[in-house]
Image: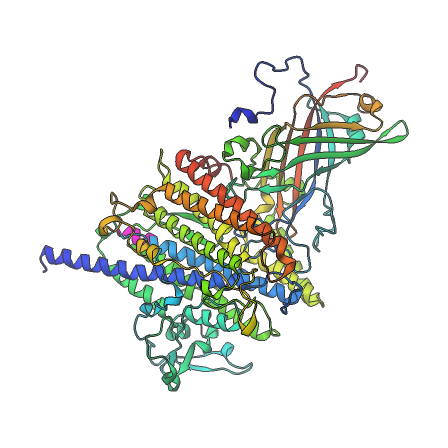
């Protein structure tokens, strides 16, 4: 297998010089949840025993799935003293050619951002990536943005999707099946130096230790207040993990893992009705040229199993002449 | 003054004595590790509506924390084993990963003689007495209770046994922190008649005594005895309560041994330090205060293949042993490799080092053990447990090789010849890939594994498929890292 085959760009000799170089960038951000096992538990561990994360005995098992939207049944948010926290990643702003685009921001802000097909952070205890350096693959990668855009007094459904395959044209192939990690290296995360000011700013927490001191205090109060033994033991396990792991839990609040890659699979921009496709955003979304996406996950609260995710989807875009 | 030849002979004899004691220490640390892992694998992780009474949800949280502690202690035993091997390597000894099987009951060899209880020491001991009372401890009146290494399920008896095996001597307990005195580890002298005639294997103070002896012997070694430097030793940067550093001189040797006894017995640790002894002691106390907690699946004690009636389960049991043997081969090869950071092909130490710990220990060894305890070994008639845990059984042939990893009786100086089974990467790859293929054959042999609890059939099958896929990938990684050190780029990224 040749490394060149992984490149999402067009083949040599057919580089599309007459295509637009200008991007419409849909910026997004928000809290995500991931009920993931952590080392040294096996990476498919459903309960969490020797790592710092766990499924409490009255909760669903750890399923390793990255959830960008609230799912109170499969992944209920644990009780916590931070009422402002809500899981949900949405479009926060739109830029065109690098400049803030007020009209299109107004149209798309609040669009729900999701990763489909139950993706996970894949390294499998250093088998396909590196847990030590936080080199993970988000697998599979199928990004979908959905919204109802106000247009002429109506709400017009819009769906934008971008898929990237580890090997172009082979959507089912997983990292564990690809012998050479160089083939999918473009999909590895690289960790920012910690603590990351970006991660801190995203969640408005700059004192990691104070944050978890408050959490310890709150959990201790709940242990004393709880009348249900299951609830009380759950609080005790949460407190135990924070105390047991110390910095390993605390400094993840300042953690930031960055990804940046193209999307070599299906790229879709669907408007209902399709006749509004160029009118709705005042231009043409080009789906047959490569898109790119950059995103980060981090600001990780290992007690609540949530963190912050932000990024941007770059779509080649040609504005209508009038806009 | 002795003449030089006598000095040389004396140094040689001393060096050999240190090596022999370190080999004992290595084996004892590995026995501890396996014993704790066996107990940890037995701990119920989830409420299931099976035939057995399971802990309720509140009890599960309690036992989860205990399981976390037991796994943590087992990891630190791995750390101790690694440090002992660095101690061995530092003075030119061969790495030592041999381990006698429990069914052979060879462990009396570890007994180091009568345990010295310093006379005249006594202390008040509120925690070991009934509430509101204190118990005077006089070490003159007590004798330590011996304990065998046993692969048993995790229960109150096991927790007490582990507490005693990790306990320091009576006199150390009294002088350092009498509040953690475990009265079930010692008997009044009048009860001594009940003790076995054979020397006991492990009793309170045994480990403390072993390392105290070793410290004394190391102190007598000349500086010139430290012949293998840091580049020949395995280093594990601090993570998950493990820190393995190179041993290069008297000071680092002393610190390595102090770390082991501080973590294990709490020797010279602060009163709040969570030594193994204190952790197990706390578990016992917490257990005694709780309602009866059926924390573990009922696993056959010290299992062997003939205990297993089900052929499929028997194959998993054998595959586990095969994987465990492969791990010991990988570790011997890794620790014996004199260049731990080669700048060019071949990259033997990076290949073994990056695959032996995580992922092979976590994704194969532990994962398969967690499968095994879910499988039906017997029909449970006649009071036989339905389940078994892993036997960690090492064949006689391999144990011989592990005890003699170098050709012609050499001990591992730089330039000496390691036997091909440890130095030949193809041998390791063939073993790992062979394991993967056998596991695939077993998965293909029937649609669902013979689990005791039907609710866990799908999970068990998925876990086996996961182990198979990852073990195959580990074999590929071994080859690729050996040839190109391809994963090194990932190791140097950012975090």
- Closest to the observer, A78 or A255: A78
Q: Which residues are magenta?
A: B86-92
Q: Residue placed farthest to the right in the image?
A: A153
> Is residue A199 depicted above or below B154 in this figure?
above
Apparent side of residue B393 relative to residue A252 in the rendered image (left or right): left
Q: Position of residue A165 (x, y in %)?
A: 62, 32
> Is residue A44 depicted above or below A23 in this figure?
below
Residue at 66% x, 12% y is A18
> Is residue A236 depicted above or below A260 in this figure?
below
Q: How is the image coloured?
A: rainbow
Q: Main secondary structure of the magenta part?
A: helix
Apparent side of residue B4 relative to residue A263 in the rendered image (left or right): left
Q: Is residue B88 magenta?
A: yes
> Is residue A154 depicted above or below B6 in this figure?
above
Residue at 27% x, 58% y is B19
The quadrant where residue A110 appears:
top right
Please indicate, yes or no, whether residue B84 appears anywhere in the rendered image: yes
- Closest to the observer, A160 or A166: A166
Residue at 42% x, 70% y is B165
The quadrant where residue A229 appears:
bottom right
Viewport quadrant of the C terminus of chain A: top right
Q: Position of residue B156 (x, y in %)?
A: 52, 72
Apparent side of residue B355 relative to residue A120 in the rendered image (left or right): left
Please indicate, yes or no, whether residue B96 appears anywhere in the rendered image: no
Q: Position of residue B137 (x, y in %)?
A: 42, 81
Q: Is residue A229 magenta?
A: no
- Closest to the observer, B413 or A283: B413
Q: How many marks?
A: 0
Q: Position of residue B371 (x, y in %)?
A: 55, 56
């Amino acid at each position: 297998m040749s490394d060149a085959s992984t490149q999402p760009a067009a083949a040599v000799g057919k580089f599309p010089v007459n295509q637009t170089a200008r991007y419409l960038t849909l910026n997004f951000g928000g809290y995500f949840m991931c009920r993931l096992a952590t080392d040294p538990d096996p990476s498919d561990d459903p309960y969490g025993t020797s790592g710092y994360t766990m499924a409490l005995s009255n909760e669903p098992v750890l399923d390793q799935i990255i959830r960008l939207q609230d799912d109170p049944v499969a992944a209920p948010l644990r009780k916590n003293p931070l009422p402002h926290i809500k899981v949900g990643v949405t479009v926060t702003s739109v830029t065109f050619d690098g400049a803030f685009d007020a009209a299109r921001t107004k149209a798309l802000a609040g669009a729900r951002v999701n990763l489909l097909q139950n993706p996970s952070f894949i390294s499998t205890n250093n088998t396909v990536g590196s847990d030590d350096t936080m080199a993970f693959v988000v697998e599979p990668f199928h990004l979908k943005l959905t919204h109802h855009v106000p247009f002429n007094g109506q709400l017009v459904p819009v769906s934008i999707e971008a898929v990237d395959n580890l090997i172009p044209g082979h959507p089912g192939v997983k990292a564990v099946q690809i012998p050479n990690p160089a083939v999918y290296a473009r999909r590895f995360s690289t960790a920012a130096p910690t603590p990351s000011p970006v991660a801190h700013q995203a969640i408005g927490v700059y004192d990691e230790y104070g944050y978890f001191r408050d959490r310890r205090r709150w959990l201790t109060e709940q242990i004393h207040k709880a009348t249900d033994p299951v609830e009380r033991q759950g609080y005790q396990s949460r407190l135990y993990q924070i105390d047991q792991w110390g910095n390993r839990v605390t400094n993840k609040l300042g953690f930031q893992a960055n990804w940046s890659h193209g999307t070599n699979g299906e790229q879709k921009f669907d408007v209902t009705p399709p006749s509004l496709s160029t009118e709705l955003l005042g231009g043409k979304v080009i789906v047959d040229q490569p898109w790119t996406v950059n995103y980060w996950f981090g600001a990780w609260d290992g007690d609540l199993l949530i963190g912050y995710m932000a990024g941007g989807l770059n779509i080649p875009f040609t504005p209508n002449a009038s806009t | 003054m002795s003449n030089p030849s006598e000095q040389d002979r004396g140094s040689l004899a001393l060096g050999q004595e240190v090596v022999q004691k370190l080999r004992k220490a290595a084996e004892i640390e590995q026995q501890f590790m396996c014993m704790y892992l066996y107990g940890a694998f037995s701990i119920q992780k989830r409420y299931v509506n099976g035939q057995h009474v399971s802990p309720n949800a509140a009890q599960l949280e309690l036992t989860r924390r205990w399981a976390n502690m037991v796994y943590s202690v087992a990891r630190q035993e791995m750390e101790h084993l690694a440090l002992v091997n660095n101690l061995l390597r530092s003075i030119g000894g061969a790495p030592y990963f041999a381990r006698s099987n429990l069914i052979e009951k060879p462990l009396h060899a570890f007994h180091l003689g009568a345990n010295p209880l310093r006379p005249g020491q006594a202390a008040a001991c509120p925690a070991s007495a009934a509430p509101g009372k204190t118990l005077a401890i006089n070490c003159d009146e007590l004798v330590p209770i011996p304990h065998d290494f046993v692969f048993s399920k995790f229960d109150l008896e096991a927790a007490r046994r582990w507490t005693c095996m990790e306990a320091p001597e009576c006199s150390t307990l009294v002088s350092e922190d009498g509040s953690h005195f475990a009265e079930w580890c010692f008997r009044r002298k009048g009860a001594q008649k009940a003790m076995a005639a054979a020397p006991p294997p492990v009793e309170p103070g045994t480990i403390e005594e072993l390392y105290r002896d070793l410290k004394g012997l190391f102190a007598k070694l000349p500086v010139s005895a430290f012949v293998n430097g840091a580049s020949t030793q395995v280093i594990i940067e601090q993570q998950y309560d493990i820190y393995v550093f190179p041993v290069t001189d008297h000071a680092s040797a002393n610190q390595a041994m102090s770390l082991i006894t501080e973590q294990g017995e709490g020797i010279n640790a602060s009163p709040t330090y969570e030594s193994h002894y204190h952790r197990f002691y706390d578990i016992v106390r917490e257990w005694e205060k709780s309602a009866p907690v059926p924390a573990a699946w009922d696993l056959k004690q010290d299992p062997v293949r003939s205990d297993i009636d089900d052929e499929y389960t028997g194959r998993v049991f054998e595959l586990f042993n095969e994987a465990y043997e492969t791990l010991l081969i990988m570790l011997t090869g890794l620790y014996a490799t004199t260049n731990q950071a080669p700048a060019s092909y071949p990259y033997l130490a990076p290949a073994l080092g990056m695959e032996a710990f995580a992922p092979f220990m976590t994704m194969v060894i532990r994962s398969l053990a967690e499968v095994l305890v879910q499988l039906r070994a017997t029909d449970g008639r006649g009071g036989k447990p339905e389940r078994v845990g892993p036997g960690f059984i090492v064949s006689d042939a391999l144990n011989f090789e592990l005890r003699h990893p170098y050709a012609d009786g050499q001990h591992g100086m730089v330039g000496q010849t390691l036997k091909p089974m440890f130095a030949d990467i193809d041998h390791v790859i063939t073993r790992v890939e062979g394991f993967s293929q056998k596991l695939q054959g077993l998965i293909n042999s029937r649609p669902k594994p013979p689990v005791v609890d039907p609710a866990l059939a799908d999970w068990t099958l998925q876990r086996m498929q996961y182990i198979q896929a990852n073990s195959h990938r580990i074999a590929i990684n071994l080859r690729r890292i050996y040839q190109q050190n391809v994963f090194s780029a990932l190791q140097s990224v950012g975090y």
